[in-house]
Image (tube, rainbow, N blue to C red):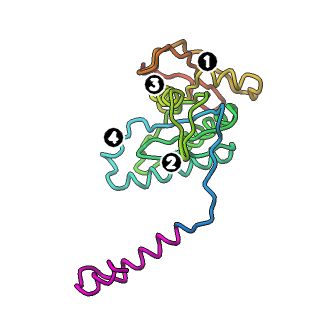
Amino acid sequence: MRLLNAAKKFKIVPVGFIAGQLQTERALGQSSDPPVQLPSGFVTMLMTDIEGSTALVRHLGERYRELIDELWTILRRSVVDAGGHEVEARADEFFAVFEAPRSAVDAAVAVQRELLGRSWTDDLDVRVRIGIHSGYPTSTETNYIGLDVHTASRICGVGHGGQVIVSANTREGVKASVPAGLRFTALGSHKLRGLPEAVALYQVAAKGLPTRFPPLRT
């Protein structure tokens, strides 16, 4: 109140604006909505990245924001439909988590199928690479940290647009419930940047998805 009175006396700033901001912050602080509870323990992490995002930004300029919004809508819908939880969306990256490995793979396949059949502005070719890893990351209030998170990120980074790459952990977790028409193609063990040991990787193959890609970007 003393700050508001001083601002009014010396006409430094519009008092009504400050008062409105304080009321907004007070309302947010009193919100009764409970925080979203992310799953803990053994979880499966799905990360995506747009292939050639720099070229897309250069071509679209400010319109790139519209492309990202449309892409995030597709990702969020596929994640929710598969029973997953969005963790983070920033720049051209998206991070979601699932309690079951099979759910993460289902979401990834759904995303790639929808993206393949979608027409984009200026007839652009928008392709997303997806990496999936199952493990025991350390939970924070709103995110995850630890080596398993880095592993999921590195797996995503070595793939190509339109490709879904999973770790051996995820492959083993899905083995008992592989749906008809879905298979895993072994890609060998690869040394990923910053990780102490090589990681066995598999490519997800499903009806409607491309199967031929260049060698992994390791």
The residue furthest front is 2
Kindly report the distance in space between the C-alpha atoms of the residues bearing marks 2 and 1: 27 Å
Kindly report the distance in space between the C-alpha atoms of the residues bearing marks 3 and 4: 17 Å
Element type where label 1 sits in the image: strand
Q: Nearer the viewer, mark 3 or mark 1?
A: 3
Crowd rating for badge 3 (residues with CA inside 10 Å; few <14, some 14–19, many 20+): some
Assess whether mark 1 and mark 3 are in contact (beta carbons under 8 angstroms).
Answer: no
Point 67% across, 31% down: residue:
101
* Amino acid under disc 4: Thr
Say whether disc 4 or disc 1 marks the residue closer to the N-terminus: 4
Crowd rating for badge 2 (residues with CA inside 10 Å; few <14, some 14–19, many 20+): some
Kindly report the distance in space between the C-alpha atoms of the residues bearing marks 4 and 1: 30 Å
Quadrant the C terminus occupies: top left
Q: Main secondary structure of the magenta part?
A: helix
Q: Is residue 73 above or below residue 154?
A: below
Crowd rating for badge 1 (residues with CA inside 10 Å; few <14, some 14–19, many 20+): few
